[in-house]
Image (cartoon, helix red, strand yellow):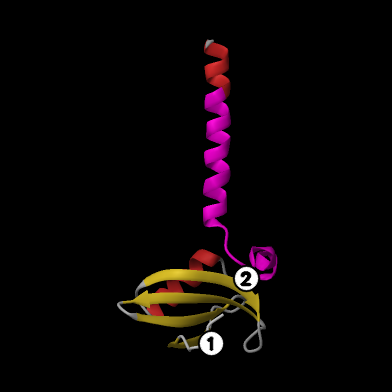
Amino acid sequence: MKASGNYVMVLLGLFLMASATDAFAYTGQKLAGDAKISLEQARVIALRAHPGKIADEELEQEKGGSGLRYSFDIRHGKVTQEVGVDAKTGDLLENAPEGPDAD
């Protein structure tokens, strides 16, 4: 019985690790190899530009800057701000209230 209990604990641990990994994934993660700025660095830049709570984050190819950027939706009170950070230079590309056609 003890061996089967250990087996269940190992399976539970693997399940929890897999769930945690999914929770930290972000849209566009497959592009991360092309970025020179890490997601963590981009978060710091974005939150300096607009303090609040990050509601969504993604790495995307988009016109402007180097063509690769982190995009953050940052909530502060009732306002959601879209903040873009160039993934290759760290430059702030956008800092504006999220529009009605948010994607």
Magenta highlight range: 8-35
Q: Residues within 10 Å of mark 1 (few under 14, many from 20)?
A: few
Quarter of the picture containing the N terminus is top right
Residue designated by label 2: 36
Instruction: Name the foreground residue: 59 vs 11.
Output: 11
Q: Residues within 10 Å of mark 2 (few under 14, many from 20)?
A: some
Question: What is the C-alpha distance between the residues marked 1 and 2?
Answer: 29 Å
- Measuring 49% from the left and 75% from the top, which residue is drawn there? 72
Q: Amino acid at mark 1?
A: Asp
Q: Is residue 63 left or right of residue 14?
A: right
Q: Residue furthest top?
A: 1
Secondary structure mostly taken by the magenta-highlighted segment of the chain: helix
Quarter of the picture containing the C terminus is bottom right
Q: Amino acid at mark 2?
A: Lys
- Measuring 53% from the left and 87% from the top, which residue is drawn there? 101
User: Looking at the rendering, which quadrant does residue 95 occupy?
Assistant: bottom left
Question: Secondary structure under badge 2?
Answer: loop
Magenta run includes residue 97: no
In the image, is residue 18 above or below residue 83? Answer: above
Tell me where residue 96 appears, x and y as whole percent. 44, 89
Question: Secondary structure under badge 1?
Answer: loop
- Measuring 46% from the left and 76% from the top, which residue is drawn there? 73
Tell me where residue 55 appears, x and y as whole percent. 44, 69
Magenta run includes residue 9: yes
Residue 101 circle label: 1
Q: Is residue 81 left or right of residue 68?
A: left
- Measuring 50% from the left and 68% from the top, which residue is drawn there? 41
